[in-house]
Structure formats: structure tokens, C-alpha cells
Image (tube, rainbow, N blue to C red):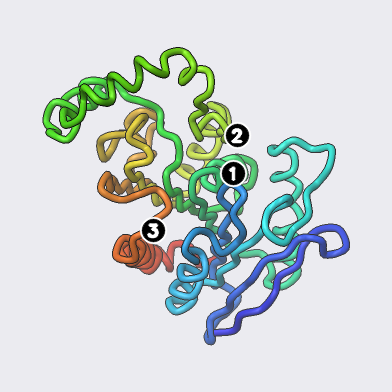
Amino acid sequence: MKERAFYYGESNRGLGTIIVPEVTDEASPIVVMLNSGLLDRREPFRLNVLACRRLAAIGYIGLRVDLSGKGDTPVRNGLNNRESVALDWQFIKKALVNQFGERNLILMGLCSGADNGIKIAAQDPSVKGLILLDPISKRDSGYSRRAFMLKLKNPYKWVGFLKRLLKRIARLAAEDNASVHPISLRDLPNDLDLQQCFRQLVTAKGRVFALFTSYSLFHYNQKGQYTRAMGLSGMADICDEYFWPHVQHLYPVEYHREQLLDALCDWCAMHLNRFRSK
């Protein structure tokens, strides 16, 4: 496989790394891996590096890219996140077409990278697949009941309960005013983005890989909830959901990273022919 620098945008200001399989043709699909938060294109624990190389071994062209203001790509002034991501994608896609021609694209993102992937796919029909790691899920009607039952069944929730209660009382309103949940910092896709994205993928018979870890427990707690709560006809047929509540958000444990890479590669291998351009 061949790995080299990838440039995009005005004066080649944007930077990424692309890996091409030893054997490829005009139909090989491209997986584009988007940044999470302020992390660079390697992602935590080199997750994107490992994923790109594993996917190249089964026939995918893999691109891990720094969006504006992240990693080695300078910030775009005067634009909000949505505008900046949209402009970045316009240039990224142009550079990919110049190098490889028109191909089917799969977007992969963790956390805010998943958010950006959904927003891009909502506007670009050439995106035929999404790999979403801890995207935001709507809560379905049974979420609150399941969350309550999980707390009742978990003995660790009761160990140290009094200690935590006393700490909360001591902090009182100060804690409420000072604390900011990480989700509030994300530029989430809106309802229109979600509807356009997944309706388009359903129509195109695309595929979605959606994996939820312990990070998502405050909004997701059962396999199948993502598609069920979306309420879009046909979405359950194209979306493969994974619920790993034992795993941490950034996959700091090597065994969990290997589990993710194995699941991801199995899924991509299963759908390779579907993603190959016609």
C-alpha cells in the first residue's frame, strides 16, 4: 500500500494523509475520516491511522484529513463551524475527484466528526455510507425507564452514594453554574440534517455503521434505539447498530481498539461490493 500527503483548498492550505491499496481500480471506494474535536487526523491513540491501513488491506482508499483549525490545517476566519466544514468538504471532494475521478464515498467520524459527517452527507449524494462513532441519538419512549432500571440493577451506583450526595450538597449551585457537558460544545446536526441525510441513504441503499459507547449513556441505552427514535421508514434496513457500554469514548484500552477495528473491517468487507462505483 502507498501512503502519501494529501492537500486541498486554496493554495493547498488543507492537509491530510491518504493511503492507496497496492491493487486498486476505478471502482475502489474512498473512506474519508474526519477529525473529532480539536484532535488531529491521527485521532486518539492513532485510531484513524490504524483504521486506514486496515481498510486499505481490504480494498478501500483511506483518507484521514485535518479540517480547518485542526491539526496541520490553519483556521478559516470569518466562518462558523458549519460553514467552514462545508467549504472544506467542497475542496476535499474536488481534490479527490481530480486524483481518483468520481467514486462512492464513505465518511467516518468520532463524536463531532460523526456530527460533521451527517451534515455533509445531507448535502452530498455521492456519500453512500457513514461510520458514526458515538453520534447523538434521539431518546425513544422507553429510554427513561431503561435508564432507571439500569441504575437499580447496578450495585456500584449505590456504593458511595452518601459521599457523592454530600459533595453535591457542598458544591450546590456553584457546580451547576460551572459545569459544562461536552455535548454542549458540539455543533450538532439539526432535524433537517438528520432527515435529509438518512432519507437520502435509504433511497440510495447506502449503509450506516453506528456504534455507541458508555459516553452515550445519557441519551442512548439500547441497541436499536437510534433507528427506532429516528422514525424514518427504511432506516433500520440500512443501519447496523452496536452498543458497547463497557467501552470508553476514546478507546484508551488496546483490546477495545482492536475490537472496534475488527468490527469496522468486517462491516466494510461485507459491504465492499455495495460501495464500489458502478
Above or below, 71 relative to 203: below
Residue farthest toward the right in the current orientation of the protein: 11
Q: CA distance from mark 1 to mark 2?
A: 8 Å
The residue shown at (53%, 26%) is 191
Left or right, residue 274 beside residue 139: right
Number of labelled discs? 3
Residue 85 is situated, as x and y percent measured from the top left of the image, at 69, 45
* Circle 2: residue type: Asp
* Residue bearing the label numbered 1: 116
Dots 2 and 3: beta carbons under 8 Å?
A: no
* Residue bearing the label numbered 3: 252
Note whether residue 270 is visible: no
The residue shown at (52%, 69%) is 49
Sequence-first disc among 2 and 3 = 2
Sequence-first disc among 1 and 2 = 1
Dots 1 and 3: beta carbons under 8 Å?
A: no
* Residue bearing the label numbered 2: 187
Front label number (1 vs 3): 3
Neighbourhood count class around disc 3 (C-alpha, 10 Å): few under 14, some 14–19, many 20 upward: few
Above or below, 68 relative to 278: above
Q: Quadrant of the C terminus?
A: bottom right
Q: Quadrant of the N terminus?
A: bottom right
Nearer to me, 235 or 148? 148
Element type where label 3 sits in the image: loop
